[in-house]
Amino acid sequence: MNQSAASKAFSGIISDGATPTALTKAGTGTLTLSNACTYSGATTVNNGVLQLTRPDGLSINTSVKLFTTAGSLNLAFTGTNRVAALYINGVAQSAGVYSNTTVPITGTGFLQVGAAAPAAPGKFSGISVSGTTLTLNATNGTPNGAWTLLSSTNVALPMAQWRTNRTGLYNGSGNLATNLVNTATNKAEFFRLK
């Protein structure tokens, strides 16, 4: 696909047919994929730039093959795209999260290789009150990982009995800030991150 120096955009969904579909990016231009793709064959960037505009631009079943001498993968989105495997210059990379700190990956997004690791719970780093709004801050969570804030008026209850107060994603640095409106007037309420 994209055999020329011209840049092209594809907004359709690339999916498997009777056999697995593979995508090979050649040519010096940029090929932009702007939809969720479900194909399970390999994604190879031999030359130019393959740009993804959403965190489900590549299937979780694809293996990504990048060659640093001429090709790059631009993760032009916020969030994490999970794939089965990553090869750079023919060398299999370890399972984990990759970003623009790994050549030849660029952009603001993240690439999760292999099974998604469970998000590490963050640590509360600050609490403040403004009127009846309680603001909780946390650090050291998994970058772009999911968090759940549990609350209870009885700290002795087993965690399974605490209620889910809210959920969200840590930012790219593993931090969060959340505002709980009309909570500061409660006599006693306890919070846990998971």
Image: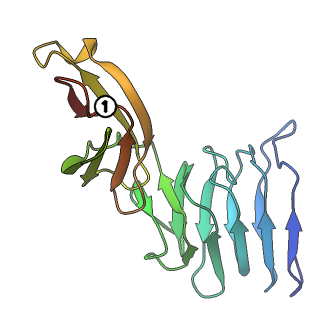
The quarter of the rendered structure image containing the C terminus is top left
Q: How many marks?
A: 1
Residue 1 appears in view: no
Outermost residue on the left side: it is: 156
- Which three-letter amino acid code belongs to the residue tagged 1? Thr
Image: 171 above or below 73? above
Instruction: Choose top left, top right, bottom left or bottom right for residue 154.
Output: top left
8 left or right, relative to 164: right
Q: Residues within 10 Å of mark 1 (few under 14, many from 20)?
A: some
Instruction: Choose top left, top right, bottom left or bottom right for residue 77.
Output: bottom right
Q: Nearer the viewer, residue 76 or 187?
A: 187
16 left or right, relative to 193: right
Image: 64 above or below 157? below
Give the residue displayed 83% in from the left and 49% down from the top.
Answer: 14
Which element type, helix, strand or loop, lies under badge 1?
loop
185 left or right, relative to 50: left
Give the residue displayed 36% in from the left and 32% down from the top.
Answer: 182
Residue 75 appears in view: yes
Residue under circle 1?
Answer: 183
